[in-house]
Image: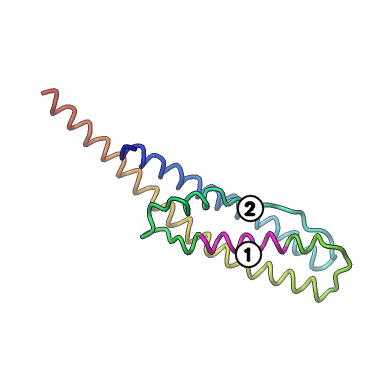
Amino acid sequence: MTLRTELRENRELLTAMILELQTNQATLNELRNWYGVFLFTGGDVPQRQCDLVAMTSYLERPFATDRISTGEVKHYGHLVETLMELGQGIAAPRPKTLRCRHDMADAFGRASSEIRTLGGTLESALTQLSKEQEQSSSACVMLQRTREISVDD
């Protein structure tokens, strides 16, 4: 694999990870509203799935561990899975006591708050790395063109 190809693939993965974090954030915002209703009415919370495809791909082939911690990416995935399991617990047979609903809503609140913080940290680091790689790629292309021009002369 050429350096140019590797850089392009890394940039694409970074972009996919950023989009995944943003999509998951939107899902969490929607679920937060549903948990607020659930807390007071005992109603249903729709089953929503967060994506972890790009995060999993990064863990399989990490390329910037000095900037994007695999431990943080794993922890983010664990938190997302915890929230999805909590949602499945709500779908379990009724009735749910007020205390039980409070406990579930509190658990969601704690986990979603941690996901928001960690997701924001990851997104910031990914965005910065993506910008740097784009600049590096541009410099690499310019260097290659300069070499091609020098060879032609």
Span highlighted in magenta in the image: 74-86
Q: CA distance from mark 2 to mark 1?
A: 12 Å
* Residue 104 locus on image (x, y percent): 74, 70
The amino acid on which the numbered mark 1 sits, given as a three-letter code, is Ser
Number of residues whose C-alpha sits closer than 10 Å to that of mark 2, classed few (under 14), some (14–19) or many (20 or more): some
Does the magenta segment cover residue 49? no
| Chief secondary structure of the magenta portion | helix
Label 2: element kind:
loop
Nearest to the observer: residue 85 or residue 104: 85
Q: Residues within 10 Å of mark 1 (few under 14, many from 20)?
A: many
Residue 83 highlighted magenta (yes or no): yes
Instruction: Tell me the residue at 50%/45% (across/down).
Output: 16
At x 57%, y 52%, the residue is 52
Q: Tell me the residue that label 2 is attached to.
A: 50
Q: Give the foreground label among 2 and 1.
A: 2
| Residue 112's disc number | 1
Drawn side of residue 134 relative to residue 49, left or right: left
